[in-house]
Amino acid sequence: MDVGFYGLGRMGANMTRRLVKNGEHRVVAGNRSPGPVDEVVKDGAEGAYSMEELVEKLSGDGPRAITVMVPAGDVTEQALLKLADMMDEGDILIDGGNSYFRDSVRRAEMLGEKGIRFLDQGTSGGVWGLQVGYCLMVGGDASAFEHVEPALKTLAPPNGYAYLGEAGAGHFTKMVHNGVEYGMMQAYAEGFEILEKSQYDFDLRAISSLWNQGSVVRSWLLELAENAFEQDGHLDSVRGYAEDSGEGRWTILEAINEDVPAHVISASLFARFASRQDDSFAMKVIAALRGQFGGHAIQEASTKYPEQK
Amino acid sequence: MDVGFYGLGRMGANMTRRLVKNGEHRVVAGNRSPGPVDEVVKDGAEGAYSMEELVEKLSGDGPRAITVMVPAGDVTEQALLKLADMMDEGDILIDGGNSYFRDSVRRAEMLGEKGIRFLDQGTSGGVWGLQVGYCLMVGGDASAFEHVEPALKTLAPPNGYAYLGEAGAGHFTKMVHNGVEYGMMQAYAEGFEILEKSQYDFDLRAISSLWNQGSVVRSWLLELAENAFEQDGHLDSVRGYAEDSGEGRWTILEAINEDVPAHVISASLFARFASRQDDSFAMKVIAALRGQFGGHAIQEASTKYPEQK
Amino acid sequence: MDVGFYGLGRMGANMTRRLVKNGEHRVVAGNRSPGPVDEVVKDGAEGAYSMEELVEKLSGDGPRAITVMVPAGDVTEQALLKLADMMDEGDILIDGGNSYFRDSVRRAEMLGEKGIRFLDQGTSGGVWGLQVGYCLMVGGDASAFEHVEPALKTLAPPNGYAYLGEAGAGHFTKMVHNGVEYGMMQAYAEGFEILEKSQYDFDLRAISSLWNQGSVVRSWLLELAENAFEQDGHLDSVRGYAEDSGEGRWTILEAINEDVPAHVISASLFARFASRQDDSFAMKVIAALRGQFGGHAIQEASTKYPEQK
Amino acid sequence: MDVGFYGLGRMGANMTRRLVKNGEHRVVAGNRSPGPVDEVVKDGAEGAYSMEELVEKLSGDGPRAITVMVPAGDVTEQALLKLADMMDEGDILIDGGNSYFRDSVRRAEMLGEKGIRFLDQGTSGGVWGLQVGYCLMVGGDASAFEHVEPALKTLAPPNGYAYLGEAGAGHFTKMVHNGVEYGMMQAYAEGFEILEKSQYDFDLRAISSLWNQGSVVRSWLLELAENAFEQDGHLDSVRGYAEDSGEGRWTILEAINEDVPAHVISASLFARFASRQDDSFAMKVIAALRGQFGGHAIQEASTKYPEQK
């Protein structure tokens, strides 16, 4: 089928490559700046150097379908609205990025008023998706889903895409997916710290590898852990600093909205916050209070970190 | 090789079956009561209806090797000590159960004084191990490990066993493995609750299946979740009640011993505690305090649960 | 000074009583329904049986000042807007309820456009405020604060009111106050549960009382705990069921907004969620997964709670 | 009454001072090194420059009573055993330090076999105890408690001491007290961090002071917070580094032993662990995994902390 892509960051570019490579689709790819377009053209996509060109090159018999892969928030909103203004009734827009599901619900309505059919598509797979396929969680207009299914089938591994419900269902599922991901990663991380600081001289690469053979905790993340420990056995070169994208935060907002106790996912999010703090104001308060009531020595803020016991 | 087993509960019996089925080993199997012995004899093991018989039947050219698979704690300790008293210098005892690693360190020393070589073997795989193989995490006497390697190779899937270090290292690793398992399960569980209580009418079986195709959270536990949701889509027939074995608790004790923040694993353990409480004394205190300062209505202990909002 | 009140629930009615009792103020009190107005009139307030009458009776030399004490959300918004429409430029509206600080920021602007000076006032003290005084945390128009200070002084205990900053600062501070309150209550609650379930036969009333004499954990909440345990030594008559108002939730939203790790306050909020669940879907997932991999018995949803070990 | 003290650290020395100042007691004070003995002699105590001298100077009509105030663990055990060997049947030993209650149970038995009556006394109050009095939580031999009650009355504020049950009950209660203390402090600490990082320019000293006037969260710890913020409004000079003593850890061990969910107290303990880590191994694992699956940039371990967003 004819497939349009707008936004050729790492994810978007690789997705066009996977579609092109398959050989069954005509892929037209656009981007704000021309460089990434040139790159995917080399790999066999048709280039579109403006939104207008993208929309134009997709004009044919059936409805157009364009997947937008740009940063969540205002950038996504603007791209969707601008494209919609150039498109025709019945055309399809897909937001394959990490948008907040409430935005997607709102956008589905907004685009629907313009006659555009909208799909919110959560996309998982990271840099491995090009080779393995992307797990695609799709919500929104069911007829649009059916129309773009040939492309989804190519993008995903076998059985790796599904229609999950009305507008927002795709991004909601991707949001929770990432919340679960935070919790799983933190579970492994705590376990590896307990192993690393133990009285034993454990080989964490060997344990990651072993656990992946028949144990209850085997998983793809654990395979990645094995890779990581193979590259640096004690992670000496890595700083314990972790960003978070919006999904973990939204998962907690939604847990609170639904009265769901989410101890593990919230703790995982907070651990990332803490990893980015140079010093903790909360712990300054603790230190100051201990100084007040117990005469416990307070370390000056400039003090170097002491050797841990 | 000649392999002895003592303790034919679900795990022990299946392990003898996997060894027998392989065809390369002579398996002598004993148990406190005769029934389970009869069962594995039907499947091709040699039966031993007493410890004495078990030890006797393993007398041959080389050292004897007996794996003990009985409940952790005193039962394991007594079984090991009794067997050791009947065995000869250089013979091998393997504790394949879920013992506390500090007990294993102590027992290695105790048995070593009797000339018995001891291995502590963490065994993961559950009811699936018979078919898939057991993940075996082994610590203790390195020469004993080499001796029993042919049996370990048969019990485990490919690359599914390893020697991890001196006495206790096997059970330590299995302990942490289970702590990680608690955290992973709770991460999934929170995620599924957020999906289930959402504004969408999600099909959790479909989502489990989908996430296992190329997504970052794919894992064997998620495959099991798919099975579970296939059997009961909203788990209506299942009560939210979860036991815990010792490993989760020991993992937290060890985290505290090592100064490791273990927010996620501890929260997972506490969630299991809470699942087993009919009412929470802590929350009675909260309710009583709210009544004291705010005049908030206190529900009587006998009150039925109200509809949730 | 002349003081207007709109909203005579438990908090609002008691606040008018405290003002009247002081003798220095003329208090005009209105309410949606007439009953509560009749009550406070008996205690010396002037009654206003409509918003119009309330505004009318406050017409005099200076600017009018009316405190609104109605449920947060739309009820508060409507009351403020209706009153504003009847008032004159320079008049003062105070929201003394538990509004979300972002609403207060927005309302300050909205009312400012009508020439009305707005104060957002967090009010703590519960049913004890009538006698002890209310702790008043005030944000918004600084000139309005100065104008109403005589009334605040009467409502609060000595030094028990303060101007904390621009619009929203009062409700922000009250929000965090309640978040801290959740955490403190949960800390005591966990401690009392550990005492109650210990091997000792502790008298929790005696311990609450003792801890309030010179110990580090002495507090007013602990005095309330002593009262509660005096009424029911083991809280047998109290169900462990705790509502939460919006503040705890908003505190977590704000923590996430500011990248602040809030393990304790979020855990306290989640404990309240859990206290209101008849069964936990998350724990159903755990139970189902354990059944899948370990053959662990699953309890049917209808099963009675077993005796705890 | 005649009162013996052994161990004149900050706590022990101040306790002897409070007893001496009262005028009703004869206080004999000993210490391992002579310096602290000289100090309390200046303040009116009788000095004992050896254990023998301490025991000798307390020989009189009735049973001797000696309070030991030395570091928990082996130091306490040795001091108790050595003193016991010099004392007579019916004499009384009091452990006023922060011992683990299980040690106290064991010591009560051990000393009981020597005919020595033992009391385990949890002591709270910190540096303020000298002036305000110490909150004393006492377990053990009830007849011994009655004998030493005159001294306890002097040491404590009014109603500030109590007999709580058999051996270990005093240290158990003190353990839980400290666990609660950790949770309360962390609740305040998180709240203050949320205030400090907010869009408002809050004066935390003013808020601490305000909250102590009639609000639900008023407490002695909050008075100390006011002092701390008065000395350093944004705690710029304080490093967020907090030690922990054994009690918080033991509280979690005991919670686990009793199947009590202790989310808040454990999170407070873990926050202290994290405050002492130069880098977090768990977060290195998270960073490494993110690098593996997402191509997210990993910061080198030597990188300086970036500006927080």
Image (cartoon, coloured by chain):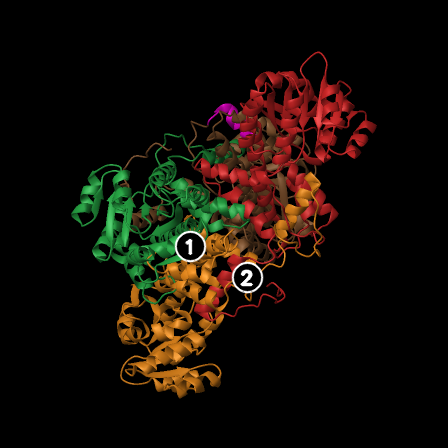
Chain colours: A red, B brown, C green, D orange
Residue on which disc 1 sits: C142
Q: Which one is nearer the viewer's eye here, D89 or A287? A: A287
**x and y percentages locating residue C72 in the rendered image:** 37, 41
Asked if residue D174 lies in the magenta stretch, the reply is: no
Against B86, residue D234 (above or below) is below
The quadrant in which the N terminus of chain C is found is bottom left
**x and y percentages locating residue D91 in the rendered image:** 32, 77
Residue at x 36%, y 75% (from the top left corner): D131
**x and y percentages locating residue A294 in the rendered image:** 45, 69
Q: Which one is nearer the viewer's eye here, A220 or C166? A: C166
Check disc 1 and report its element: helix, strand or loop: helix
The amino acid sitting under disc 2 is: Gly
Asked if residue B231 lies in the magenta stretch, the reply is: yes
Q: Which one is nearer the viewer's eye here, C17 or D131? A: C17
- Residue C230 numbered mark, or none: none
The magenta stretch is B224-234
Residue at x 50%, y 48% (from the top left corner): C255
Few, some or many residues within 10 Å of mark 2 (<14, 14–19, 20+):
many
Please give the chain letter of the residue carrying mark 2: D
**x and y percentages locating residue B97 in the rendered image:** 55, 44
- Residue D240 numbered mark, or none: 2
Against C132, residue A99 (above or below) is above
Does residue B251 appear left or right of residue D140 in this picture?
Answer: right
Against C15, residue A182 (above or below) is above
Residue B48 lies in quadrant: top right
**Secondary structure, magenta segment, majority class:** helix
Let me know if marks 2 and 1 both belong to one chain. no
Does residue B216 appear left or right of residue B250 in this picture?
Answer: right
